[in-house]
Image (spheres, rainbow, N blue to C red):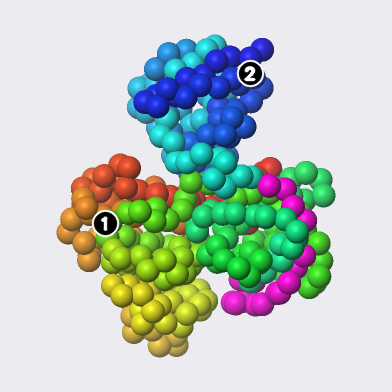
């Protein structure tokens, strides 16, 4: 059965079958609501049911609290319609701006950036167009139909390549393949781009980029894009890792300070050992932001990393520093099946 869905405040309408999520139906209709993981973990796609009934689906408790649920909020990546609906949902863009494509790609480069991080460059087909925004991600489509999601670590450009930073996950089927058996010239199938985590290029407010581990990847793409377009507002990059070795492109990040006026790089290490010789900031990366900013009410934050880091940062920045709800853009890495951010 199909149902009519209307989005507020814009009034856009589309239809959705009862076996489709609201998000999938919106994307099929050429609309791009704010969304991230598509697995009910990151919480980026919250909407409010104004009229109608939905099946909430399966989601992580931290992504949608009981109070939010009682207030009529849902995660549209999980919710399926059970009647005609009116929903309050924030839209990011039109899907026609960056259409989702499924394409074959050839492995162009493999480079070990750290003991557990591999750079994988994928060469796009010369005869096919693939557009994306700095910060978005793609899915690797496996032979059995499962997907593995990875942020694009480079900015849109003329190279025809997509750069991925793949962290080895213990027992991970695909990441084990990347580290143990993948070879240059192998063919992979990709789908994308996905997500509403991307640089708002028309912004005029200071920007804080917050990354944990390989959450640095989309932030790298955002900074490279900012350099390319001459982004004017000041940008502060806070990159956190357990040890200095986890800052696997530390010198690259340092180099941006001479390439982009107003750019600052603040690396933060949580578990440095005496033998590491680390003399920089220590502790949790979001706490470094709290130390440096007494007021975030006029700042845009882009945060990428594990869900606990994202939720802690969102809560503390909003509650303690006055960050506006619409100014927190997040991409939470997840490891759920069938769609996982390896």
Please state if 322 lies on the left or on the right of 248 as rendered.
Answer: left
User: In the image, which is nearer the foreground, mark 2 or mark 1?
Assistant: 1
- Distance between the alpha carbons at the discs numbered 2 and 1: 41 Å
Q: Is residue 135 above or below residue 181?
A: above
Segment colored magenta = 101-118
Query: Residue 263's spot in the image, x, y percent?
Result: 32, 72
Asked if residue 78 shows in the view, the reply is no
Q: Residue at x 59, y 30 (%)?
A: 29
Q: Contact, CB < 8 Å: mark 2 with mark 1?
A: no
Quarter in which the C terminus is drawn: bottom right
Magenta region includes residue 229: no
Q: Which residue is mark 2?
A: 18
Lower sequence index among marks 2 and 1: 2
Please state if 320 lies on the left or on the right of 120 as rendered.
Answer: left
Quarter in which the N terminus is drawn: top right
Q: Quadrant of residue 19?
A: top right
Query: Residue 225's spot in the image, x, y percent?
Result: 46, 65
Query: Residue 118's spot in the image, x, y percent?
Result: 64, 71
Label number found at residue 205:
1
């Amino acid at each position: 059965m199909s149902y009519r869905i209307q989005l507020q405040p814009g009034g856009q309408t589309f239809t959705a079958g009862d076996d489709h999520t609201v998000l999938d139906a919106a994307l099929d209709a050429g609309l791009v609501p704010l969304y991230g993981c598509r697995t009910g973990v990151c919480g980026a796609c919250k909407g409010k049911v104004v009229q109608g009934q939905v099946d909430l689906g399966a989601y992580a408790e931290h992504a949608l609290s009981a109070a939010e649920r009682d207030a009529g909020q849902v995660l549209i990546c999980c919710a399926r319609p059970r009647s005609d609906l009116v929903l309050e949902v924030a839209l990011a863009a039109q899907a026609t701006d960056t259409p989702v494509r499924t394409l074959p790609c050839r492995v162009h480069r493999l480079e070990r950036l750290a003991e557990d991080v591999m750079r994988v460059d994928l060469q796009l087909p010369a005869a096919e167009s693939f557009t994306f925004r700095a910060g978005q991600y793609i899915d690797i489509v496996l032979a059995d139909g499962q997907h593995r999601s990875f942020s694009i670590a480079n900015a849109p450009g003329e190279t025809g390549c997509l750069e991925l930073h793949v962290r080895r996950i213990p027992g991970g089927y695909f990441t084990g393949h990347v580290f143990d058996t993948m070879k240059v010239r192998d063919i992979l199938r990709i789908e994308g781009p996905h997500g509403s985590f991307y640089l708002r290029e028309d912004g005029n407010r200071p920007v804080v980029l917050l990354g944990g581990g390989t959450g640095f990847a989309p932030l790298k793409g955002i900074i490279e894009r900012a350099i390319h377009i001459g982004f004017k507002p000041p940008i502060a990059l806070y990159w956190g890792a357990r040890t200095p070795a986890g800052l696997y492109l530390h010198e690259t990040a340092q180099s941006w300070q001479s390439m982009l006026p107003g750019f600052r790089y603040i690396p933060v290490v949580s578990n440095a050992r005496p033998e590491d010789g680390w003399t920089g900031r220590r502790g949790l990366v979001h706490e470094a932001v709290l130390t440096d900013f007494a007021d975030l009410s006029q700042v845009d934050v882009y945060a990428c990393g594990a869900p606990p880091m994202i939720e802690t940062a969102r809560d503390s920045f909003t509650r303690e520093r006055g960050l506006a709800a619409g100014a927190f853009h997040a991409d939470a890495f997840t490891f759920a099946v069938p769609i996982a951010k390896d």
